[in-house]
Image (cartoon, rainbow, N blue to C red):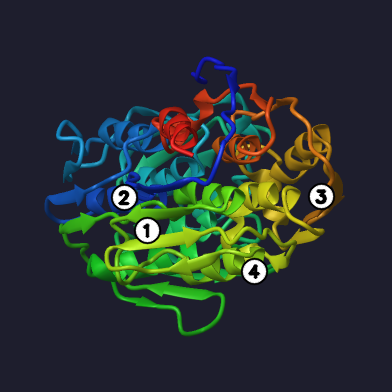
């Protein structure tokens, strides 16, 4: 069920925001660790995971398939693999990771596994990964639109072999297949055919984590991934703080001329920190990496940018909010695929930023944003946590921005309203 709507007045800052924040783990890393742990040949520990709606539903889905997932300790989850079996029902919520990562796992189960989720989840694209699964011998029944609700008739094994997928709509189509591929009888040779795959850092995270679990992965040929059949090892996964989740807090430093440090940042990361640093620097911030942290400092200037966001598309809503507050126009392009995210993020950003007074031109693959005097207004969040983050960032400097639903932030950071209010109160 969708969360109850919680209208919320975004707090405004009265001065620079200067603080250190400790945030939960990466959603992307937590989801991948859960899948790899469930398919491993022994128990695993997931340290500092994200505990939020998406990962709670992922854990529940794995339990329904016969995996023991103990989340009672909060910051240290235990995963004990078991025989995968149906019948089972999986609630995906609105999570792309669940709807794309779990059907290949269900193909390995013995029995039927039914998938459904929030109303908008039925609109999110699934066709390419389901077609690839069918080509590998998995029997899948989908809705007339090719997506949810769907049923996977697991046969206890997936032969594997070769498959082709058009992953231009989501890198998760590739990641979902690769994460289970070592357990396919013949492994998997997966070829992408179509426009460029977005969110390349997420694909690199997938292959890095597969190798860390003992899989043999060859990605030396562009748009081709080869995973050899073999066991996955149980191990301890230590999850990094969520970089996308930290972005609104970094943006707060930029908007107010303050400084925000994300505590616990690793010296070496599997997330696209270099690309984010380039983008925030272009907007006018200073980005440094003190020991055990990542700091973004506002310089008093917020510049417009022209940027290809295809590698960091998840960050588009907050970067669009910064663009609306900048001193010149911005063009944010290369993100056509985010029209298939929790909502059509391009259309939603165009509508809501226009409502606040910005000049917005909508392209097929992005937005041109021309800063104008902004005003408070009701900001529709579309059950999308990133839209809520964008509204909160604008609200720091524009009084009267009212989010129709702040509860949607529970998808990845249930504490967001309290953390954000505390941040503004300390300005």
- The secondary structure type at the circle numbered 3 is loop
Q: Residue at x 48, y 44 (%)?
A: 139
Residue 205, picture quadrant: bottom left
- Which numbered circle lies on residue 35? 2
| The residue positioned farthest toward the left in the image shown | 42
Local packing at callout 1 (Cα closer than 10 Å; few below 14, some 14-19, many 20+) is many
Q: Is residue 105 left or right of residue 399?
A: left
Q: Nearer the viewer, mark 4 or mark 2?
A: 4
Which residue position holds label 1?
A: 179
Asked if disc 3 and disc 4 are in contact, CB closer than 8 Å, the reply is: no
Q: Residue at x 65, y 63 (%)?
A: 283
Asked if disc 4 and disc 1 are in contact, CB closer than 8 Å, the reply is: no
Cα separation, mark 2 vs mark 3, equals 43 Å
The mark that comes first in sequence, 4 or 1, is: 1
Relative to residue 78, is residue 268 depicted above or below? below
Q: Nearer the viewer, mark 1 or mark 3?
A: 3
The mark that comes first in sequence, 1 or 2, is: 2
Look at the image and tell me whether residue 16 can be seen.
yes
Image location (x, y in percent) of residue 302: 68, 58
- The secondary structure type at the circle numbered 1 is helix
Q: Is residue 385 left or right of residue 419?
A: right
Look at the image and tell me whether residue 159 can be seen.
no
The mark that comes first in sequence, 1 or 3, is: 1
The residue lying toward the viewer, choosing from 144 and 171, is 171
Which residue position holds label 4?
A: 282
Asked if disc 1 and disc 3 are in contact, CB closer than 8 Å, the reply is: no
- The secondary structure type at the circle numbered 4 is helix
Cα separation, mark 4 vs mark 1, equals 35 Å
Which residue position holds label 3?
A: 371
Image location (x, y in percent) of residue 165: 59, 62
Cα separation, mark 1 vs mark 2, equals 7 Å
Cα separation, mark 3 vs mark 4, equals 16 Å
């Amino acid at each position: 069920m969708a969360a109850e709507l919680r209208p919320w007045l975004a707090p405004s800052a009265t001065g620079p925001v200067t603080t250190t924040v400790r945030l939960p783990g990466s959603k992307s890393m937590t989801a991948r660790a859960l899948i790899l742990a469930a398919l491993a040949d022994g128990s695993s520990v997931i340290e500092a995971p994200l505990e939020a709606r998406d990962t709670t539903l992922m854990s529940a889905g794995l339990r329904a398939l016969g995996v023991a997932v103990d989340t009672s300790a909060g910051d240290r989850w235990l995963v004990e693999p078991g025989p995968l079996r149906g019948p089972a029902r999986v609630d995906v919520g609105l999570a792309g990771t669940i709807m794309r990562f779990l059907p290949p796992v269900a193909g390995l189960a013995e029995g039927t596994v039914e998938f459904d989720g929030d109303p908008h989840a039925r609109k999110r694209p699934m066709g390419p990964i389901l077609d690839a699964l069918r080509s590998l011998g998995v029997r899948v029944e989908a809705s007339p639109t090719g997506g949810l609700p769907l049923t996977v008739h697991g046969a206890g094994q997936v032969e594997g072999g070769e498959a082709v997928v058009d992953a231009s709509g989501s890198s998760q189509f590739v990641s979902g297949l690769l994460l289970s591929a070592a357990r396919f009888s013949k492994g998997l040779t997966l070829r992408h055919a179509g426009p460029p795959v977005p969110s390349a850092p997420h694909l690199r995270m997938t292959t890095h984590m597969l190798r860390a679990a003992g899989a043999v992965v060859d990605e030396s040929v562009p748009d081709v991934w080869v995973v050899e059949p073999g066991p996955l090892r149980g191990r301890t996964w230590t999850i990094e703080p969520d970089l996308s989740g930290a972005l609104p807090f970094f943006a707060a430093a930029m908007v107010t001329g303050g400084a925000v440090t994300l505590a616990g940042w690793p010296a070496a990361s599997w997330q696209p920190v270099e690309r984010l640093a380039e983008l925030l620097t272009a907007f006018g911030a200073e980005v440094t990496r003190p020991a055990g942290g990542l700091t973004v400092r506002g310089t008093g200037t917020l510049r417009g940018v022209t940027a290809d966001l295809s590698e960091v598309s998840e960050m588009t809503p907050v970067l669009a909010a910064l663009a609306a507050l900048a001193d010149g126009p911005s063009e944010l392009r290369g993100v056509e695929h985010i029209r298939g995210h929790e909502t059509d993020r391009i259309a939603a950003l165009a509508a809501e930023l226009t409502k606040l007074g910005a000049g917005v031109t909508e392209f097929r693959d992005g937005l041109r944003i021309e800063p104008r005097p902004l005003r408070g207004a009701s900001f529709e969040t579309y059950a999308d946590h990133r839209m809520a983050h964008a509204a909160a960032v604008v609200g720091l400097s524009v009084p009267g921005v009212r989010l129709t639903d702040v509860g949607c932030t529970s998808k990845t950071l249930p504490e967001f309203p309290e953390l954000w209010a505390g941040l503004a109160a300390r300005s």
